[in-house]
Image: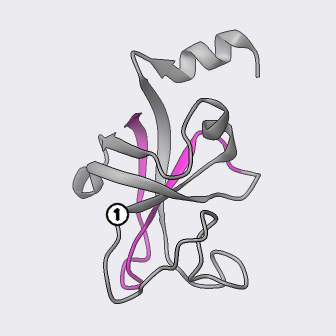
Amino acid sequence: MNVLALISLSCHGQIIVTATVYNAVASQTDSDPLITASMKKIDPNKPQRWIAVSRDLERLGISMGDTVCVDNAGDMNGQWVVEDRMNRRWRRRIDFLVHDSIKLGKWNNVKLIK
């Protein structure tokens, strides 16, 4: 990614991303869906405000364990902790970890503020 592309991603400490949801199930994660990339155990009976981030966001300074503020994502707005990593195919994207009863959700132009 060139310098101009990096500048367009980040403005005044915020990064514009697409946000989606995921469930802690093998079809959406890996063979051990209750363990995040940061090695945290997901408790399906206790809501956590955890997100997964695309790997390009890590190069922009978003790291495991960081608390970030999400804006422009409706009910998902607020503070979330980075505890998981998305598949290599995704760019400029975050995934909200949600209960299995929530199947769909997508927001464009979401502000991610560290």
Name the quarter where the C terminus is drawn. top left
Q: Is residue 112 magenta?
A: yes
Give the quarter of the image for residue 92: top right
Is the residue 92 above or below the residue 86 in the image? above
Q: Is residue 73 magenta?
A: no
Q: In this rendering, is residue 29 above or below 71?
A: below
Q: Nearer the viewer, residue 74 or 26?
A: 26
Find residue 20 and report its horizontal and vertical position in percent: 48, 58
Residue at which label 1 appears: 49
Give the residue displayed 42% in from the left and 85% down from the top.
Answer: 43
Q: Residue 111 location in percent, x, y?
A: 38, 35
Q: Quadrant of the N terminus?
A: top right
Left or right, residue 47 beside residue 109: left
How would you rate the neighbour count of disc 1 (Cα within 10 Å): few for under 14, some for 14-19, many for 20 or more? some
Residue ID at (45%, 46%): 66
Left or right, residue 101 beside residue 33:
left
Amino acid bearing label 1? Arg
Q: Position of residue 19 (x, y in %)?
A: 46, 50
Q: State which quadrant residue 69 falls in.
A: top left
Q: Secondary structure at mark 1?
A: loop
Toward the top, the furthest residue is 4
From this view, report whether residue 58 is shown above or below residue 23. Answer: above
Residue 30, located in which quarter of the rendered image? bottom right
Q: Give how far across and how far down residue 4 sits, in percent.
A: 66, 10
Which residue is at 34% across, 63% downward? 49
Pick out the residue farthest to the bottom. 45
| Span highlighted in magenta in the image | 90-114
Looking at the rendered structure, the number of numbered marks drawn on it comes to 1
